[in-house]
């Protein structure tokens, strides 16, 4: 160790120079973009009724005169145009001509099942309107004018309404409509019949679509199937 001029020198190596340390560079925090606020949905208090936005379609039957046979048939044609699924359920098959027994008439009556007619009809003679217990009734004779010596039976039935039937010439004719009970095969039925002059028709009774759709199907190639009880 040398001492010179009051300074003490240790060894022959000089003291290491101080090392400058670069200041730590901190990156600026990245700017974070927050999502736009979502507006809160309006919550209706419980129990508040919800208003329907779909309007109910108009009923095509509104404004239809129930006593107008032509209007009723046109309305039925519009409804029948909508396809309906066919089920596998068995239904009875009838011929286009059958024998029926009308309540109050002992003899069987010949009836034609006609899908071209809406309402059933029956040949009636000597029609007479009267009241019973404050309600309107009709008294008339049931017979088969196609027979040489037909049996004539007078029966009574409550009047349902007066229908307007359009004739081939375009003129509307009022006809009484009554409700009758009858048996076809072993089935007891009831339906509305217009009282008509069917002396120039093939059968004194016509069964229309309103009753056929309750009975079953009609085979246009067969007759008198009711008692055979054929199901398809």
Image (spheres, grey):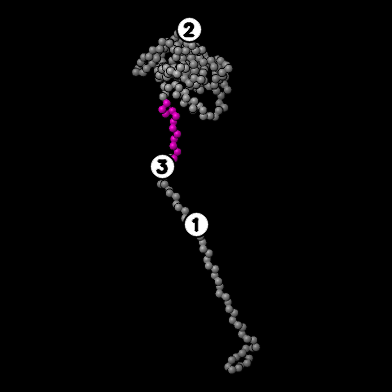
Looking at the rendered image, the disc whose residue lies closer to the viewer, 1 or 2, is 1
Q: Look at 55% across and 28% down and name the residue there.
A: 86
The quarter of the picture where the C terminus appears is: top right
Residue 22 seen from this side: yes
| Of the pair 153 and 112, the residue shown nearer to us | 112
First in sequence: mark 1 vs mark 2:
1
Callout 3 touching callout 2 (CB < 8 Å): no
Callout 1 secondary element:
loop
Callout 1 touching callout 2 (CB < 8 Å): no
Find the residue positioned furthest to the bottom: 5
Mark 3, Cα crowd under 10 Å, few <14 / some 14-19 / many 20+, is few
The magenta segment is 53-64
Q: Where is residue 2? Give x, y as percent.
A: 63, 92
Q: Where is residue 19? Give x, y as percent.
A: 59, 79
Look at mark 1 in the image and give the residue it sits on: 35
Looking at the rendered image, the disc whose residue lies closer to the viewer, 3 or 1, is 1
Report which quarter residue 8 is drawn in. Answer: bottom right
First in sequence: mark 3 vs mark 1:
1
The quarter of the picture where the N terminus appears is: bottom right
Q: Where is residue 91? Give x, y as percent.
A: 55, 23
Callout 2 secondary element:
loop
Look at mark 3 in the image and give the residue it sits on: 49
Mark 2, Cα crowd under 10 Å, few <14 / some 14-19 / many 20+, is few
Find the residue positioned furthest to the left: 134
Report which quarter residue 124 is drawn in. Answer: top left
Look at mark 2 in the image and give the residue it sits on: 150
| Of the pair 172 and 13, the residue shown nearer to us | 172
Q: Where is residue 61? Give x, y as percent.
A: 43, 28
């Amino acid at each position: 160790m040398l001492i010179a001029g009051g300074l003490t020198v240790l060894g022959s190596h000089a003291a290491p120079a101080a090392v400058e340390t670069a200041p730590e560079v901190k990156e600026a925090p990245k700017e974070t973009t927050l999502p736009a606020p979502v507006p809160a949905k309006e919550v209706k208090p419980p129990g508040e009724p919800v208003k329907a936005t779909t309007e109910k379609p108009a009923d095509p039957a509104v404004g239809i005169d129930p006593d107008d046979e032509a209007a009723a048939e046109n309305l039925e044609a519009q409804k029948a145009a909508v396809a309906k699924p066919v089920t596998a359920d068995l239904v009875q098959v009838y011929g286009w001509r059958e024998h029926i027994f009308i309540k109050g008439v002992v003899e069987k009556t010949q009836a034609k099942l006609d899908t071209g007619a809406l309402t059933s009809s029956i040949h009636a003679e000597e029609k007479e309107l009267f009241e019973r217990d404050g309600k309107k009734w009709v008294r008339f004779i049931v017979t088969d004018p196609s027979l040489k010596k037909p049996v004539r039976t007078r029966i009574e039935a409550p009047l349902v309404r007066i229908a307007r039937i359009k004739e081939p010439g375009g003129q509307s004719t009022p006809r009484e409509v009554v409700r009758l009970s009858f048996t076809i095969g072993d089935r007891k039925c009831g339906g509305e019949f217009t009282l008509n002059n069917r002396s120039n028709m093939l059968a004194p009774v016509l069964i229309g679509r309103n009753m056929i759709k309750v009975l079953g199907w009609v085979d246009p190639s067969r007759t008198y199937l009711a008692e055979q009880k054929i199901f398809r």
